[in-house]
Amino acid sequence: MTKHFTDLSGQSFDGFTVEVDEARQRGDIILDRGDYNTISMGQRDELRAAFEALDADPRVRVIVLRAIGEHFSSGGYIRGFLEASPEHVSKLADNIAAPARCEKPVIVANRGYTFGVGFEISLACDFRLVTPTTRYALPEQKLGQIPGSGGSARLQKIVGITRTKDIVMRSRRISGQQAYDWGIATEIHEDDQLEAATDKLAEELLAFSPMAQRTAKKMLNQAEECHLQTAIEVEGYNYSRLRQSDDFREGVLAFHEKRAPKFQGS
């Protein structure tokens, strides 16, 4: 059966571009709106659509979210919150959760300001790479508001209520090093090595079975919401399902034959 996909490369988007590198099996969403990469209301809808299209694209195994310039994103276009309808505002978290819903692994590369919605969409990704210049913040308290795109909820799952209150209720900025020390960031690299580190991680993920990668992501996301015993049962179910796969058989044979496995995703 022929697989259909939407090629987003070369299309015009609000504040970002999309690149698909078929040879590297990678799709990049690149924020590109001036010095601070502010994110507009309309851009949120388009970002969701871009993630969904790359997730459905058979040429893409890994999705990367990155930015042009000194700062990943200073956050949303503030006046847009007053101009948006209540219905539109109610969908903010759903749009920004798009990376978490992707079956494929999503890497985000953060440098400089990563505030508000920039931080929130990064928290929805699977791997966060930072530099010493990275500054994470949820500054909504300074506007008489709270985070509205899932940021406080996701952050609390990672660092607990005490540290989340410190960041949210004080609109406190934390450095890339502190984010790494607290387990918010996956890796920290020097600023001029961020792109190379992102490339290396994307290439590393390609070596694994795409089916096992999808299953691991879904299982871990589900387990985050479960009691321990339920999470163990979810893990067991998924282990049993993968036991039937061609990739698992190939992995076992390759191990015994002392060679690199050639996974097909089935």
Image (cartoon, helix red, strand yellow):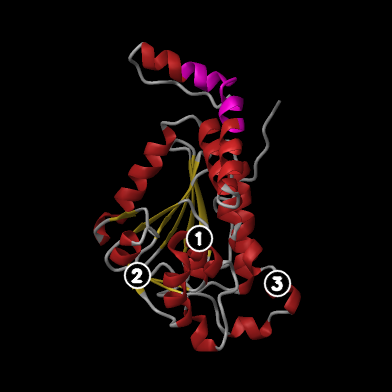
**Dominant secondary structure, magenta:** helix
Q: Does the residue at mark 3 contact the one at mark 2 (Cβ under 8 Å)? A: no
Task: Tell me what residue is drawn at x 35 percent, y 62 percent.
Answer: 182
Q: Disc 3 on helix, strand or loop?
A: loop
Q: Disc 1 marks which residue?
A: 157
Q: How crowded is mark 1: few (under 14 residues within 10 Å), some or many (20 or more)?
A: few
Quadrant assignment, res 192 = bottom left
Work out whether residue 59 can be spotted.
Answer: no
Boundaries of the magenta span: 237-250
Task: Tell me what residue is drawn at x 57 percent, y 84 percent.
Answer: 145
Q: Which of marks 3 and 2 is nearer the N terminus?
A: 3
Q: Which numbered tag is attached to residue 41?
A: none
| Amino acid at dot 3 | Ser
Q: Which numbered tag is attached to residue 112?
A: 2
**Image location of residue 9, percent across then percent down:** 55, 50
**Image location of residue 183, percent across then percent down:** 37, 58
Q: Does the residue at mark 3 contact the one at mark 1 (Cβ under 8 Å)? A: no
